[in-house]
Amino acid sequence: MRYFDDKPELVAAILAKYPPQGRRSSLMPLLREVQTALHYVPAEQIEEIAEIVGVTATEVRAVMSFYSTYSTVPQGKYHLQVCATLSCALAGSDELWDDLCETLGISPGEVTPDGLFSVQKVECLGSCGTAPLVQVGELGYHERLSRQDLHALLDALRRGEYPGPHSPLPVFVHSGQQEDAAGARHGAELKPLGENL
Amino acid sequence: MKVFVDDRAVEVPAGTSAMDALFEAGRDVPYFCSLPYLSPIGACRMCLVEAGSPRRGQDGQWILDDQGQPKIFWLPKPMASCTLAASEGMVIRTQTDAVRKAQAGMVEFTLLNHPLDCPTCDKGGACELQDRSYEYGYGASRFVFDRRHADKHYPLSDLVVLDQERCIHCKRCVRYFEEIPGQEMIDFIERGVHTFIDGYEGGLPSAFSGNIVDLCPVGALLDNVARFRGRNWEYDHTATICTGCSVGCSVTVDARNGRVERIVGRDHPAVNERWICDAGRFSHALEEEGRLTTPLLRRGGELVPASFDEVLAYLTSELVDVPPAQIGLYSSSDITLEEGIALEATAQVLGSGHVDHLPRFSQLPALPRPTLHQLAQASAVVIAGADLGAEAPVAELRIQEMLRGAAPPPQFRHGTAIADLKLTERMERHPERLAIFSSAPTSLDRSADLVVRGDPQAALSAIAAALEGNAQAASPYLSAAELLRRPGATLVVGSELQAAGGLRLAEKVARSSGAALLALPADSNALGLAYLRLVPGEGGAAYGEAILPVALVSRCRRLPAQWPRLLIVHDTTLSALAARADVVLPAVSGLEKQGTLVNLEGRLQALRPAASEVGEATDLIPALGLLLQALGLRSPVRGLISAQRALAQRFGARVQSLPPEGALLDLGEPFLAETHLQHQPEVGAWAAAHLAAARARAAANRALEVAK
């Protein structure tokens, strides 16, 4: 049995969201449904979605390959995405990545034997002020992540508990001084040009 | 409306794109993604210009500048002129430093990941990217990193190979499949620099897949039949007409070292636009298999090579006691008008009524024929007993154009609009405008709302009854009758109906509904040959109907029911018929002849010989001359010049000086006769044969390599 065979109401509800001439738009929610349920979109479901929407399988692939949300290879229940762009790299994302892969014993494209984890290096997630950073599936960001934090996170996930996203405030900089969480400023103050001379 | 391009003012119709306006003004911008007949999408960003328009104030008057002239509100960034609509008073700058810098920057961007394959690339020398880089680029790259590496030999199908590294993502091929044949085949996969083109439908199951090779601006999509066969500057290009079917598509035949290597489509806005079918493009390799280059003579039961002198001596001795009026002359219907009039003259000299051409139909419609342009602009089309995919493939594309309402494309001084803003991706198609009645599935079924399987003649009778008001309510025949009653509707009939003698019925339907009637001819020049006396005369026998002492048969593959006692075959290869002949004369193919063909519209078009080595092969005129010489007779038509003179006398037109687009001429009254030798549509059936031949050739080459 194919994925949507026993879900006529769901398919009808998704298709009903779009006018007849915009039927192709239902590609996205249908793909998302499969991705969420199976943690990837198998070739068979690509064909199935193409049939439901009335487009070619090529077009379904074209759409889904554009978005990194959808995967054609199986992913774990928790897909860990490690930002590897400049700020995170400076803040130690490479070491974090190596530690993660070693701890889980997998490389990109693989899933841990318990089906829980898969890993991927990604480009900038837009949280440079709180580097380094790991995104857990679509659950949330875990920022300023140390190795201990990472191991604690993995342990919690293994226990089936998701501790929730962790987004500490970024370090604000005023006149060259760094502001801590309590609002106190540290370091030398940057004076207007010429005054430091 | 008036548009100002640099220092030139130009008048263009409303709806024109800035790109067409500036080309109309004689200016130039580079472009990779736009293409006549395809929608403009602004993908390549090469056609950047600076543009601005005057605006009207709240009082409806132009807002004026300090000098009292309409103030030009410049668009803040360079604009892609292909997707920018020209407007009244628009000012376009194509020659400023900013424009040059923007275009050069885009060239550099496009070249970032483009491999430096030019010395081994089949497109080299005829590459839009090469040319535009030379004309508009900086001439140097600042990109020092590794280029993208991808599959360089990715077969999209048996006939088209993709080099993923060379692709610049212009999307022409993706758009082509969706817009022109209406078959979505390929799409962009992945995104950004990783984007590549692929399809998951299993090859390119379209009869028009080869066109993507022509339209690729780089060497990414390559003709697998012609791949690595020659560089563009080595080819001898011949602009001629495809003789595969009665559409008469304009093609360029490229030959190298006397061998036809490649056929590409040529733009003819009124006939094939710029598209040709795969049969016309790729089957030349098949034509080349086992070509005859010398005459063959049967000696001791075997066909052995001989000289023309030996053949003449043999025929002279064999024909001594044969009455010339008993000699049969039969030809296929793809011969030129010149060959046709020579055949007619020869029959007259012989006094023989045993003359015929095949395949042909017994009748021709007496109504004026619609042109392909009119077909593409028809309000509705009803097809009865025709499989266009097998009989006239490119006419199918014109019907797809009709379903999109895309015709006619605007014409400018620079030709067909390069960026026609009326065209968009995924235009709404109107399958309700098309109805098909045929006994077998046809390639257009997928595009029609109304498809009825069954005898097309019975269907036409029912439509005729419906037109007279004798139909039961809400039948498909009533719907078809209503379609035909629309002003500008066209009825298309093909071999199935005409072979069954249904043409008079079709004429009746067309007359009573007011629709135009397009009857597809049986072969590439069957329509033209109908205006020559090439049908059995008084007491004459049709092909294979009587046991004749001698018959000359040119390029008919069909075996006769009755064999002549002496068979002379004029053919390109040793066909099953030729293998049983007493004399085989080598013939040139449709690519190698000079002459005139009449396509399904009645358009006379010039055929020019490709620069290929044909040995002693000739067209039909010298073969007829040889026969007459053996009999000691002499025909008034002995060569191309005398044939053209005879045609000028007959039709009052100089066929040797036709305009490039051909000419629609009135050829007078046709000569008709009943025939049972009907047309077997086979244009669509070439692919399997071609692929089998190509594989055999590849296996032979491999064996040769191993032997070395």
Image (tube, coloured by chain):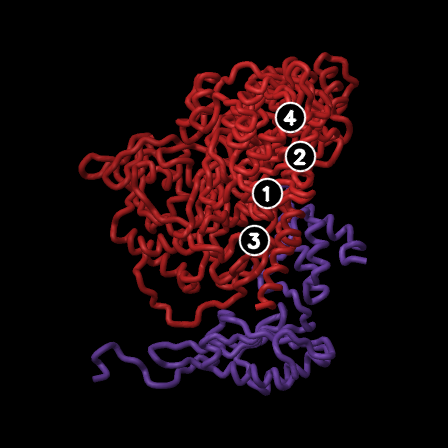
Chain colours: A purple, B red
Query: For the residue labelled by badge 3, is the local secondary structure a helix, a strand or a loop?
Result: strand
Residue holding disc 3: B160
The quadrant of the rendering that contains the N terminus of chain B is top left
Tell which subunit mark 3 falls on.
B
Residue at the spot 54% in from the left edge and 72% down from the top edge: A122
Q: Nearer the viewer, residue A153 or B295?
A: B295
Tag 4: amino acid = Arg
Whether labels 1 and 4 belong to a single chain: the reply is yes
Tag 3: amino acid = Val
Tell me which numbered mark, 2 or 4, is placed earlier along the sequence: 4
B542 relative to A58, above or below: above
Query: For the residue labelled by badge 2, is the local secondary structure a helix, a strand or a loop?
Result: loop
Residue holding disc 2: B681
Q: Nearer the viewer, residue B529 or B646?
A: B646
Tag 2: amino acid = Pro
Hey, which quadrant is residue B530 in on the image? top right
The quadrant of the rendering that contains the C terminus of chain B is bottom right
Tell me which numbered mark, 4 or 3, is placed earlier along the sequence: 3
Q: Residue furthest bottom?
A: A148
Mark pair 2, 1: CA separation: 12 Å
Residue holding disc 4: B360
Q: Pointer 4: residues within 10 angstroms few (<14), some, or many (20+)?
A: many
